[in-house]
Amino acid sequence: MYRIVGADQKEYGSVTAEQILQWIKEGRANGQSLARDEDGPWKPLSTFPEFSAVVGTSAPPPLAATAPAAIGAGQGTKTHGMAMAGLVCSLLGIVCCGPVFATLGLIFSAIALAQISNKPLQFSGKGLAWAGIIISLVDYVLFVVLIRKTDILDEILKNLPR
């Protein structure tokens, strides 16, 4: 099974060799298309023996020219800054300013998650973004619980004899 980078810089797969051969015939892939076998390194299709006869064996362009910011997750990707900011803001929401930082954390994390999903070969940090979203939601629940407890304590204190 293979994974392949499309012209849109998105990663596709797992696909069979037969599927890649079909894509080559349809013009959807060529010798410079980046691919990898299982967890192997990313390399142009022309360097795979099973595809070289179909795409030719001409020397492929350097990887930097083929895929600007792309290799696979964990290889050449960078953690999305908004994912980190979302996590930090949501953690700050627990200790101070509750819903203000929780809201910022939720917004930053959601934006990061969307951008990471659109450019998975360029950015990593999906786990951080999800953690920021979850912690922000927990912040809201804690805030509501604390407000409710404060209201109950106020009622108790009002009803105490003086």
Image (tube, rainbow, N blue to C red):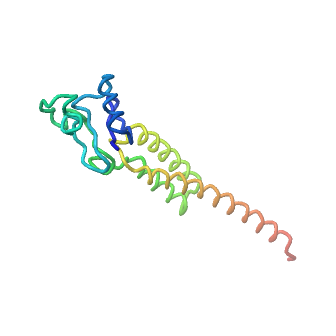
| Occupied quadrant, residue 162 | bottom right
Compare residues 137 and 8 and report the one nearer the observer: 8
Quarter residue 9 falls in = top left
Q: Nearer the viewer, residue 94 or 12?
A: 12
The residue closer to the viewer here, 9 or 147, is 9
Note whether 81 is above or below 23 in the view shown.
below
Residue 28 at x, y percent in the picture: 32, 26
**115 vs 144, nearest the viewer:** 115
Name the residue furthest bottom: 162
| Residue at far top of view | 26
Residue 145 screen position, x and y as percent:
69, 61
Q: Residue at x 14, y 31 (%)?
A: 57
Q: Is residue 46 above or below residue 89?
A: above
Residue placed at 50% from the left, 44% from the top? 110
42 to the left or right of 10:
left
Classify the position of the N terminus by image quarter: top left
Left or right of 70: which side holds 56? left
Q: Position of residue 12 (x, y in %)?
A: 38, 38
Residue appearing at x 31%, y 45% in the figure? 72
